[in-house]
Image: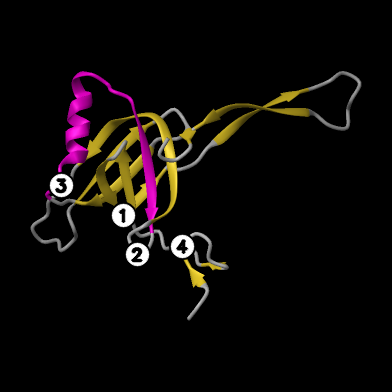
């Protein structure tokens, strides 16, 4: 038996592969995804030059910037993602969402919460009769920053 595991509390935690993400709004799962980009935060930096001090410039942290999330997956019969996108066409309803990285046992390894998110772009598959690629779709989501996951 090994003490290596992706489960919390293991003495030698194994990194989990970036294979699957699950996105939930409240308790409703809108889909599992194979690719996610834009999970980052960056702070603006303000420089303040003080007269008489020539050895350095004061640097202060400004506002946080969060890029849009882009989620991609193979197309299935599951429709919650398109339903959410369609609901936001007439009235933008901002909702908190949770992004979960799923482990090999299909349980969340780590989760990230995003405040007041809503979808802004959906991209469907490219059709090519000569291709053997999986049909994919992508959803782009804006949000107002990170929150405690599932809050």
Percent from the top left, x then y, of residue 82? 18, 37
Measured along the vertical axis of the image, is residue 51 above or below residue 119?
Answer: above
Compared across the picture, whether 123 is left or right of 111 comes to left
Report, in whole angstroms, how far the alpha carbon at label 2 lies from the one at label 1.
16 Å
| Sequence-wise first label, 3 or 2 | 3
- Mark on residue 34? 1
Q: How is the image coloured?
A: secondary structure
- Judging by the rendered image, the residue that carries numbered circle 2 is 105
Q: As rendered, which of 116 and 50 lies closer to the eye?
A: 116
Quarter of the image that includes the C terminus = top left
- Judging by the rendered image, the residue that carries numbered circle 4 is 7
Q: Residues within 10 Å of mark 1 (few under 14, many from 20)?
A: some
Q: As rendered, which of 123 and 84 lies closer to the eye?
A: 84
Percent from the top left, x then y, of residue 57? 80, 29
- Contact between marks 4 and 3 (CB within 8 A): the answer is no
- Contact between marks 1 and 3 (CB within 8 A): the answer is no
User: Please, which residue is most extreme toward the bottom here?
Assistant: 1
Q: Secondary structure at mark 2?
A: loop
- Mark on residue 77? none
Q: Secondary structure at mark 4?
A: loop
Closest to the camera, between mark 2 and mark 1, is: 2
- Contact between marks 4 and 2 (CB within 8 A): the answer is yes
Closest to the camera, between mark 1 and mark 3, is: 3
Q: Is residue 45 magenta?
A: no
Name the residue rendered at 27%, 50% in the picture.
32
Closest to the camera, between mark 3 and mark 2, is: 2
- Mark on residue 78? 3
Number of marks: 4
Which range is magenta?
77-102
Q: Residues within 10 Å of mark 4 (few under 14, many from 20)?
A: some
Report, in whole angstroms, how far the alpha carbon at label 3 lies from the one at label 2.
21 Å
- Contact between marks 2 and 1 (CB within 8 A): the answer is no
């Amino acid at each position: 038996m090994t003490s290596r595991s992706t489960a919390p509390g293991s003495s030698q935690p194994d990194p989990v592969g970036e294979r699957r993400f699950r996105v939930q709004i409240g308790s409703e799962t809108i889909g599992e995804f194979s690719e996610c980009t834009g999970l980052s935060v960056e702070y603006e930096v303000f420089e303040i030059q003080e007269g008489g001090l020539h050895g350095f410039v004061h640097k202060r942290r400004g506002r946080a910037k969060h890029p849009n999330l882009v989620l991609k997956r193979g197309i299935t019969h599951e429709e919650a993602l398109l339903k959410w996108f369609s609901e936001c066409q007439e009235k933008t309803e901002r909702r908190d969402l949770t992004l979960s990285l799923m482990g090999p046992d299909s349980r969340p390894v780590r989760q990230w919460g995003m405040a007041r998110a809503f979808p802004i772009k959906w991209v469907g598959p490219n059709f090519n009769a000569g291709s053997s690629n999986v049909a994919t779709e992508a959803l782009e989501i804006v949000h107002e920053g990170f929150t405690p996951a599932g809050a």
